[in-house]
Image (cartoon, grey):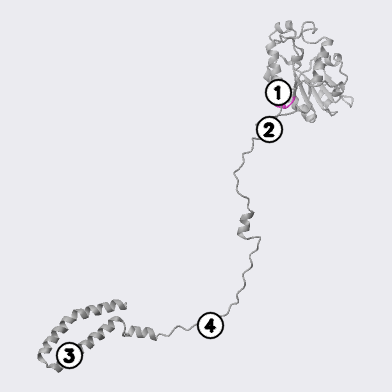
Amino acid sequence: MHKRRGFLIIKMLVDIIPVITLIEDKAMRRFDGLCKSVLRYIFFASFFALLLAASGCVPNEDNAAQSEIPPPPTASLPVVEETPAPEASSENTPREQDAEEPAWSAPTTEPPAQTAVFSPDLDESEPVGDEFFQDAAFIGNSLLDGFRLHSGITCGDFYAYTSMTVMGVDVKQVVELSNGKKGTILQGMAQKEYGKVYILLGINEIYMEPDEFSLHYGKLVEKVKEIQPEADIYIMSLTPLGKEKSEGSDMYSLERLRSYNEALYNLAKEKECYYLDIYSALADDEGFLPKGDSTDGVHLVPDYYRVWLNYMKCHYASGEEEAQLQDS
């Protein structure tokens, strides 16, 4: 602000010098040498006074007022004792925390999980003895009863009756119970704990459509599982028929018989039961019972039941076949 004021004064002096010079010339003409000297002294004195005021060397009223303002009094503040800052724990220092954090690594891609998928198939194994069937229950019709009588098997409990069907297992009162009364096959089986259950049914239901037959068969399997939850269940295929029997009736045709066995295989897979392919073990190259090995085109001659038993002794659940691991 002082510099601006000085600049204005100097400008004013510069503007007034010509005026003063003009006055001086006129005065010089009127006064003698003494007056001329006095006027010249006054002129230069005034000029230097103005110059000093412009440069700020001469204090003005504002500067004097500012210089006379006393400094503000210093208030006495209460003394506050400084509390020493807590020492940083060596366990929580950022540098050490960073050092403890594991270095980032790219996520690894885990291999796809494997899912246990049950397989109903039974591979051929070393033959077992009759004692293998010690804890077995057999459910079936007259074909299975012929197996009991003529195969030579010496172990197991048989619930096999003529004309038995999948619907009759839980309906027909054919079993003598421990209380002396008659009961169904399932009621009789519930009196004992079994490790294996073999089922042979279907030839008496051949008039039904395969899907309907499979539906009733599946309900029977579920009931067997309820009363024997720890048992391995074996679903046996229908046995082959004689050629004359098969070709003489559409109901007993080879195609229909095979469609029934296909339904049984799929059911075994669905219900996690084992599938015993008795049909393949007993059929000839054409898919029929060999000529001379059947009495009526349905039932077997006694010696041929032994072929059936030998097949069963070599096809069983050893534990390794219970589940096959496949990529999900």
Give the residue type that dot 2 points to.
Thr
Q: Nearer the viewer, residue 143 or 38?
A: 38
Q: Is residue 173 magenta?
A: no
CA–CA distance in space, label 3 to label 4: 61 Å
Q: Is residue 45 visible?
A: yes
CA–CA distance in space, label 1 to label 2: 20 Å
In the rendered image, which residue does mark 4 sit on? Answer: 76
Which quadrant: the C terminus? Answer: top right
Give the residue type that dot 3 points to.
Leu
CA–CA distance in space, label 3 to label 1: 141 Å
> What residue appears at the point 82 percent right and 23 percent down from the top-left corner?
185
Q: State yes or no: discs 3 and 1 in contact (Cβ < 8 Å).
A: no
Magenta-colored span: 267-273
Give the residue type that dot 4 points to.
Ser
For residue 116, which numbered disc appears in the image? none
- Looking at marks 1 and 4 on the same chain, the residue that comes earlier in the sequence is marked by 4
In the rendered image, which residue does mark 2 sit on? Answer: 115
Q: State yes or no: discs 3 and 4 in contact (Cβ < 8 Å).
A: no
CA–CA distance in space, label 2 to label 3: 125 Å
Helix, strand, or loop for circle 1? helix
CA–CA distance in space, label 1 to label 4: 100 Å
- Looking at marks 3 and 4 on the same chain, the residue that comes earlier in the sequence is marked by 3
> What residue appears at the point 12 percent right and 86 percent down from the top-left corner?
25
Q: Is residue 270 magenta?
A: yes
Which quadrant: the N terminus? Answer: bottom left
Work out whether 259 lies above or below 135: above
For residue 39, which numbered disc appears in the image? 3
Q: Residue 304, position in %: x, y?
A: 82, 11
- Looking at marks 3 and 1 on the same chain, the residue that comes earlier in the sequence is marked by 3
Tell me where residue 59 sits by quadrant: bottom left
